[in-house]
Structure formats: structure tokens, C-alpha cells
Image (cartoon, rainbow, N blue to C red):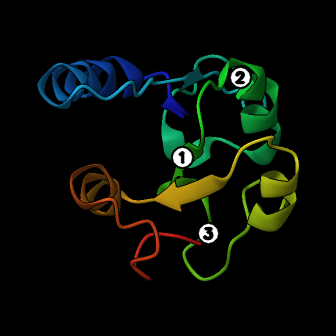
Amino acid sequence: MTGTLFAPVLQRLIARLNNRFGTRLDVVAVENNYFGGDVSVAGLLTGQDFIAARHRVRGEFAIIPRVALKGDEPVMLDGMRFEELQARFDVPLYAFDFTSLARLLTEGDRDNGQGSV
């Protein structure tokens, strides 16, 4: 799950990864309803934005960009705590930066202590 600005770039990267390794990863472009449609970056997405898009998540887990959380605590701009957001999803939910996402995809390390919350 990411903002609509980065989603097409990530979709191309994920398509290459899927072709190369036979994975079935999917990118969900999340609209920013909290600040409005002109806001398209992942760092300004809120818990409510992710909840509105959760019905489009397919598979065994979902990942949101770590930048959507405050730097010093797991809270989003609308005040929703990451734990609250996790409870609203039917699959495990993780927050990763791009480096941690790459590590997950290449090494399968979900609990590296750097990017997960």
C-alpha cells in the first residue's frame, strides 16, 4: 500500500520482481481522502485512508510505508495508532521503509527490528 504518486513506480518494480521470482505481490494505490485528492504522497496518508483501501488488499499480509508514521512513535497524522490500524485489517500489517521492504522481499526477514513496527 502506498500513495498514488509512487504507486506506478512501485507497480513496475513489483511486476519485475514477480516475473523474476514467481511471486504474486500486488501494489495498492491509496487515495488521500483526509487531505484531499491532490495530496498523493505516502507520508501524508492516514489510518482512515488505509482503512478505506483495505478491501483491495489480497494475499497473506499488507505493508504500509513507514513514512506514514511519526518518526518517534507509531502514530499517523489522524492520531490513529499503528496497533489500531493493524486490528482493522484481516491480514498481518507491517510498516517498512524501502530498505526494509527490499530486505523482506529478498530475504524474507519481517522481524529485522529496523523497519517493522
Quarter occupied by the N terminus: top right
Q: Nearer the viewer, residue 95 or 36?
A: 95
Q: CA distance from mark 3 to mark 2?
A: 20 Å
- The residue at 32%/20% (across/down) is 11
Q: Which mark is residue 92?
A: none
**Residue underneath mark 1:** 63
**Residue underneath mark 2:** 36
Q: How many marks?
A: 3
Quarter occupied by the C terminus: bottom right
Q: CA distance from mark 2 to mark 1?
A: 22 Å
- The residue at 24%/61% (across/down) is 107
Residue 72 placement (x, y as % from top left):
59, 83
Q: Nearer the viewer, mark 2 or mark 1?
A: 1
Res. 73 image quadrant: bottom right
User: Tag 1 or tag 3, which sits nearer the N-term?
Assistant: 1
Q: Which mark is residue 70?
A: 3
- The residue at 68%/52% (across/down) is 92
- Along the horizontal axis of the image, is 50 left or right of 84? left
Residue 78 visible in the displayed image = no
Q: Amino acid at mark 3?
A: Lys
Residue 7 placement (x, y as % from top left):
40, 23
Element assignment for label 3: loop
- Label 3 Cα neighbours within 10 Å, binned few <14 / some 14-19 / many ≥20: some
Q: Do residues under tags 2 and 1 come within 8 Å of each other at their CB atoms?
A: no
Element assignment for label 1: strand
